Each structure stands twice: as structure tokens, then as C-alpha cells.
């Protein structure tokens, strides 16, 4: 009997440091849920509630030391709900202890079915950035995730913060966990029988990002709708040997279908062209067939940062919209937006409209809030960061802007956000 019951004590091995350690144990409080692989229990560790994933069918012998290694190495970034302690083998099985998922995080699948909704594009971009950064760090640690799918992500719809779960299949790059991944998220070469690696992770990442932005699978259009019944043989075709991107400009056989794929039909033309161009390239025949050519995580991060720089609050309807080269009308109210006031930051131009948040560095946290001072009839920049800015007026007056403080938006003012980052307000 591998199942555990309330009050059972489970002994731990490994990870002495934080916070669970050798020679200690957890006590089962109750079951939280179960899946094909095992059961997740609420457990008490030293007065603290944590989660225990307990395998019903303990995976092969390699799995146990691999989990132990991952625990000893620690999480690649705070995006991961990483295993914190391994249990001893007992009751014919074993498991690992991790932190509980906070209640305000929803499974990514809920976003796809509109059961959860991002508060803003700003939150959506924060989620995309955190996912890309998490996978960059994971690959930098020499791991591959192997089983990236919509059940692994939990997202706070308010902030876009992400927790990546089910990290027990994470393996050193090039090693095989025995897990092939979830059908719709597997790269074509894995569908065809290959071993998952960082390149196939990158395919899965691009699928996840596409679904995040457009709420539709990139390969699910007319062909999939016409399929009488999804069998394994069809899956191998649609997601493998005969995969066709729904907006493949050279092959219109798998276009989205009206009445079925409404989300993507609406969002594809509305979101910026740079996003369309990137996905069109990443799901092209060439990228589907050549895993090593797929875009690396850092470049996804750059793309998301570019999108974020172009996201503004419309001064007319106060909704978010994207400003693109040659296109500065609001995607909600259709009115033109005055983008002449800008913060020039190296090669970047950030638009200053009332309510817009600016991201100066790359820590995925807003640093500046643009506000309006209706009495004075001008815009203000509020320092949301933890550092003090130094502002210099065109006449050479110096002013410091401490965290929480505001300064006026006037062309010619130069701002040092930190030693390496200097900007200037311009009236373009
Ligand atoms: Zn508007």
C-alpha cells in the first residue's frame, strides 16, 4: 500500500539547510489532490504547512537520486515551486516536500478556458517574462524540463507572477526521464520518438507563450477541427509529421475556424506585428524541423521587453494599448494617442502617458509610474523603484527623487536611474 493516511509520519533525507532537513519528518494532515503519478498531501513540518508529493507507482531507480540532486542544487529561480526535501523510501514508495501553492495562483489551463483572466496586458507580459526567465535559468543550470505543458504553470492573474510546478521530471540536459511530455506540447521531433532536451523545451515554451497571448494552440485550426476523432495516429500527424501553424503564410490548410477559434481570430491582428512575425517564424516549417535554430530564451525576453516598452495607457479611454511604428491609435477606443512625450533610454523610447508604467531594468518589476497633475497641467514620474534617481534640468539644477517621490515631466530633464542607466525626457 503506497497511500498514506492522516497522522502518518514520513521521514526525510537530504537538504539540511532550508528549511527541511535530515533526520526530520513531516506528518500527513490531509489529501489535497491526486493524479496519474501520485497524491499530493498537506503536511505539517515543524509547525509549518507544506505539500508532499507521494508517488503511487514509484518511478525507476534513477528517479530517486536525480530528485535528490535537484534538491541539493536548489531552484534555478524563484519561478519554480522546487522540491525542498526528499523522503526516505517507505511504504513501498517515496516522495518529496515542497512549499504550498498560494491560493491566488490559478492553473494556466483556467486562463485558456476563460475561468481565470489576466487583470491587464501588463500582468500577461509579466507572466510571459517570468516563464522565459525561469526556463533560461533552468537551461543555464544544465537542466531540461522535458514535460512542459499547461498543467505545470500557476499564475496570479493580478500580477502575472508565475510558479512552475511538477519539477520532478527535470533532468540534466541530454538525459532521459522516461517522460515524453504531454501530447500537444511535445516538439515534433519528440512526437516522432526523439528524446526531450533544451531544444524541445524551447518548442514547448513557444507553444505556451502563443497560448498565453492568443488563447489558442498554434497548431489547432481547421485540420484539427475536421478530425473525426483524435487518435494517437492523428496526434502524431497534427503535432508531429504534418504539423502546420494556423497562420502559416505559405499553407492555409489549417487556418483558425470562425465560431471555434474566436480568441486567436480576434487577438492575432490586434496584438503587435513583432509578435506575429516572431511566432510565424518560430512555427515555420524550418523551425519545426530544425530544433537547434529555435529562438533562445534571452531573445524571447528581449521581445517581451520590447512589447512592454510599447504598452501604454490610452489617455482617452484609460485602457491599455500598444503603440507601434506608424500606428498610434488606441486598440480599444480607436482614438489617436499623443506619443510626443518620451523617455529616451539608450536605444529605447518609452512613451509617457498618464497611468503608464515603465520598466527601466530587467527585473520584471515596474520602476516608474506616470501620473498627471491636473492643477499644473503636466505629467509626473513617480519613483516606484528602491533606488534614488538624480534628475538634472536643462539649466543645470540638480534634484534627487527618492523612492515614492515624484518629479515633473519636462523635455530636456536628464535622469540617472542608477550608475549605468541614464535617460532623457524628450518631446519628439
Ligand atoms: Zn482608448
Image (spheres, rainbow, N blue to C red):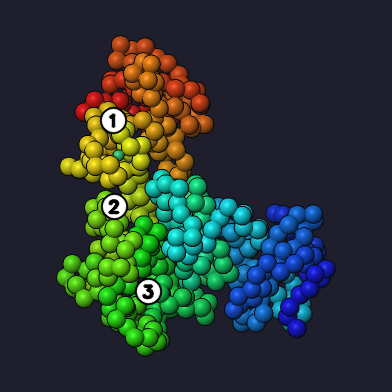
Residue 202 seen by the camera: no
Give the tally of numbered discs: 3
Residue 94 seen by the camera: yes
Residue that badge 3 annotates: 187
Residue at screen point 52% across, 62% down: 107
Which badge, 2 or 1, is on the more N-terminal residue? Answer: 2
Decide: marks 1, 3 in contact (CB < 8 A)? Answer: no
Say few, some or many: other residues with alpha carbon within 10 Å of mark 3 (under 14 / 14 to 19 / 20 or more).
many
Name the secondary structure under disc 2. loop
Name the secondary structure under disc 3. loop
Residue that badge 2 annotates: 271
- Is residue 387 shown above or below 31? above
Apparent side of residue 236 relative to residue 4 in the rendered image (left or right): left
Nearer-the-camera pick, 176 or 105: 105
Residue that badge 1 annotates: 342
Q: Quadrant of ligand 1?
A: top left
Residue at screen point 73% across, 78% down: 3
Residue 21 rendering spot, x and y as whole percentages:
75, 60
Q: Quadrant of the C terminus?
A: top left
Name the secondary structure under disc 1. strand
Amino acid at each position: 500500500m503506497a497511500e498514506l493516511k492522516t497522522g502518518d509520519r514520513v521521514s526525510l533525507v537530504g537538504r539540511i539547510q532550508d528549511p527541511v532537513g535530515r533526520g526530520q519528518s513531516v506528518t500527513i494532515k490531509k489529501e489535497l489532490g491526486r493524479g496519474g503519478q501520485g497524491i499530493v498531501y498537506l503536511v505539517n513540518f515543524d509547525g509549518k504547512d507544506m505539500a508532499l508529493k507521494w508517488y503511487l507507482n514509484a518511478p525507476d531507480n534513477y528517479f530517486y537520486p536525480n530528485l535528490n540532486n535537484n534538491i541539493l542544487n536548489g531552484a534555478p529561480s524563484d519561478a519554480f515551486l522546487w522540491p525542498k526535501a526528499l523522503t526516505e523510501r517507505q511504504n513501498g514508495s517515496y516522495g518529496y516536500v515542497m512549499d504550498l501553492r498560494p491560493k491566488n495562483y490559478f492553473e494556466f489551463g483556467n486562463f485558456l478556458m476563460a475561468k481565470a483572466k489576466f487583470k491587464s496586458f501588463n500582468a500577461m507580459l509579466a507572466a510571459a517574462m517570468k516563464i522565459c526567465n525561469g526556463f533560461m535559468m533552468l537551461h543555464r543550470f544544465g537542466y531540461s524540463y522535458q514535460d512542459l505543458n499547461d498543467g505545470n504553470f500557476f499564475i496570479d492573474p493580478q500580477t502575472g507572477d508565475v510558479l512552475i510546478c511538477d519539477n520532478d521530471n527535470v533532468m540534466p540536459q541530454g538525459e532521459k526521464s522516461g517522460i515524453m511530455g504531454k501530447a500537444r506540447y511535445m516538439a515534433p521531433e519528440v512526437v516522432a520518438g526523439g528524446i526531450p532536451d533544451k531544444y524541445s523545451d524551447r518548442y514547448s515554451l513557444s507553444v505556451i507563450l502563443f497560448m498565453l497571448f492568443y488563447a489558442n494552440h498554434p497548431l489547432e485550426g481547421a485540420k484539427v477541427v475536421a478530425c473525426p476523432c483524435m487518435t494517437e495516429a492523428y496526434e502524431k500527424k497534427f503535432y508531429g509529421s504534418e504539423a502546420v501553424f494556423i497562420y502559416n503564410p505559405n499553407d492555409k490548410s489549417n487556418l483558425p475556424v470562425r465560431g471555434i477559434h474566436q480568441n486567436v481570430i480576434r487577438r492575432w491582428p490586434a496584438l503587435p506585428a513583432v509578435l506575429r512575425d516572431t511566432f510565424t517564424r518560430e512555427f515555420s516549417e524550418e523551425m519545426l524541423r530544425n530544433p537547434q535554430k529555435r529562438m533562445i530564451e534571452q531573445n524571447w525576453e528581449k521581445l517581451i521587453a520590447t512589447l512592454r516598452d510599447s504598452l501604454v495607457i490610452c489617455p482617452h479611454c484609460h485602457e491599455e494599448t500598444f503603440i507601434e511604428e506608424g500606428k498610434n491609435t488606441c486598440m480599444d477606443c480607436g482614438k489617436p494617442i499623443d506619443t510626443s512625450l518620451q523617455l529616451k533610454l539608450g536605444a529605447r523610447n518609452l512613451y509617457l502617458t498618464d497611468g503608464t508604467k515603465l520598466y527601466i531594468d530587467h527585473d520584471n518589476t515596474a520602476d516608474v509610474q506616470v501620473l498627471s497633475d491636473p492643477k499644473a497641467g503636466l505629467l509626473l514620474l513617480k519613483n516606484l523603484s528602491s533606488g534614488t534617481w538624480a534628475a538634472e534640468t536643462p539649466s543645470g539644477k540638480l534634484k534627487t527623487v527618492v523612492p515614492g517621490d515624484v518629479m515633473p515631466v519636462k523635455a530636456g530633464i536628464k535622469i540617472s536611474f542608477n550608475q549605468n542607466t541614464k535617460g532623457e525626457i524628450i518631446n519628439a
